[in-house]
């Protein structure tokens, strides 16, 4: 695992290097004082910690150029500038750490990034292996999560919209959400969507390969963050 740190402040850069080394001593760590130096390096990082306010190319410009070369790296902005948080979505940032932050917060974010890197490296998606056993009438049916486009609550039942049709069963959406994992998102209290089948979205609706799902406004920002994380994880863009 290779972790790169890019910050034009020597003290901050050294502190981040020390922090990474403390928690992941076996990781290969590269340190860069500018976006230009980072982009010129032939070795591509798996995880990148990037400042935004830097001399020369700023962090956002660097991130856009970096994404042309490396679409799968996990990008964490480490910055004192809060106003760029929404632009960070455009370059598929995994997290946005605002300085100053605690060592505990840094450790949590770094572990989440490493966990995602390890999952991506394994090449196996949990959702591809998981299935849901439901009872319909007197029959038990095994449903692959990978085939579920979305789920909705209707008349006290859960309706599963699958690639080959719909089925209904009595159950709790919260239990399905917990089983489904991070490839699914609860866009609205009555809807659970599978990122795999999202076509487009806005602040009120998620458009899927089959049908639509409501989007609660309060969930929109988290949906965008999670969806871009999903896209990055599977390497579609």
Image: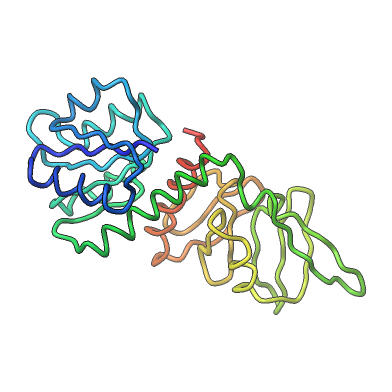
135 horizontally vs 150: left or right? right
Image location of residue 62, percent across then percent down: 22, 31
At a point 45% along the width and 44% down the height, the residue shown is 117
Quick one: quadrant of the N terminus? top left
Image location of residue 38, percent across then percent down: 22, 28
For residue 113, above or below residue 57: below
Image location of residue 167, percent across then percent down: 79, 62
The residue at the far front in this view is 26
For residue 228, above or below residue 99: above
Which is nearer the eye, 53 or 112? 112
At a point 63% along the width and 65% down the height, the residue shown is 179
The residue at the far bottom in this view is 156
Image location of residue 164, percent across then percent down: 79, 49
Which is nearer the eye, 49 or 223? 49
Q: How many numbered tags mark residues here?
A: 0
Which is nearer the eye, 141 or 25? 25
């Amino acid at each position: 695992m290779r972790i790169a740190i890019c910050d034009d402040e020597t003290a901050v850069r050294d502190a981040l290097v020390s922090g990474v080394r403390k928690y992941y001593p076996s990781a290969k760590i590269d340190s860069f004082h500018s976006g230009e130096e980072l982009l010129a390096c032939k070795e591509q990082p798996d995880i990148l910690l990037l400042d935004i306010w830097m001399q020369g190319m700023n962090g956002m410009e660097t991130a856009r150029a970096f994404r042309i070369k490396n679409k799968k790296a996990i990008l964490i902005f480490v910055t004192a500038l809060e106003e760029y948080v929404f632009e960070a979505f455009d370059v598929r940032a995994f997290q946005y750490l605002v300085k100053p932050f605690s060592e505990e917060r840094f450790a949590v974010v770094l572990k989440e990034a490493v966990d995602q890197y390890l999952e991506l490296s394994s090449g196996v998606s949990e959702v591809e292996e998981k299935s849901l056993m439901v009872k319909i009438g007197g029959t038990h049916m095994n449903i692959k999560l990978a085939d579920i486009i979305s789920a909705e609550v209707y008349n006290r039942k859960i309706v599963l919209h699958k690639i080959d049709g719909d089925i209904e069963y009595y159950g709790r959406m919260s239990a399905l959400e917990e089983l489904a994992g991070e490839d699914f998102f609860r866009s609205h209290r009555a809807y659970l969507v599978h990122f795999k089948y999202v076509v487009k979205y806005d602040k009120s609706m998620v458009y899927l390969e089959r049908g639509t799902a409501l989007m609660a406004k309060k969930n929109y920002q988290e949906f965008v963050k999670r969806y871009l994380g999903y896209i990055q994880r599977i390497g579609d863009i």
